[in-house]
Image (tube, rainbow, N blue to C red):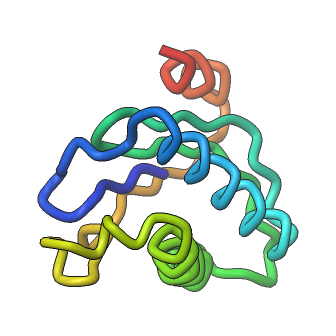
Amino acid sequence: MIFIPKQRRKIFYKEIRKEVVEILRTLCEYKNVELVKGSISADHVHMYVKIPPKLSVSEFMGYLKGKSVLMVFDRFPQMKQGSGRHLWARGYFVSTVGVNKDVIREHIQK
């Protein structure tokens, strides 16, 4: 899955990047979602996850983006400035993985 900050701003650097990694990892654990691989670039997030069948992708993404924005703004209040209190852009990209899982892992590592 791939999702981006509002207006694709380049905001994930240094300490913010480290905290967002921990926040996303923690939120995955809360929902029993296995984070197989992930990476955060300055302007987008890649995650390769295993979501349990009882949880829909849209439900998980709503939870992940909704809770993470609250946690990020709590730790970095200055990020609320000029963002209209939004961190993530609307929407996300998701694809299911079958035979090409190794290709996806390699792509995320880049």
Q: At 41% from the left edge and 50% from the top edge, which residue is drawn?
A: 2
Residue drawn at point x = 29 percent, y = 75 percent: 80
Would you say 36 lies left or right of 85 here? right
Q: Is residue 32 left or right of residue 25?
A: right
Q: Is residue 76 left or right of residue 26?
A: left
Q: Is residue 106 above or below residue 57?
A: above
Compared with 104, 63 (above or below) is below
Q: Is residue 72 above or below residue 49?
A: below
Q: Nearer the viewer, residue 21 or 75?
A: 75
Provide residue 10's location: percent of width, then percent of height: 23, 42
User: Left or right of 49: which side holds 108?
Assistant: left
Please, is residue 100 above or below residue 85 in the view?
Answer: above
Image spot of residue 108 (x, y percent): 52, 26
Q: Which residue: 45% across, 65% down?
A: 76
Where on the picture, by quarter, is residue 48?
top right
Residue drawn at x 57%, y 45% is 47
> Which quarter of the figure has residue 75?
bottom right
Q: Nearer the viewer, residue 20 or 1?
A: 20
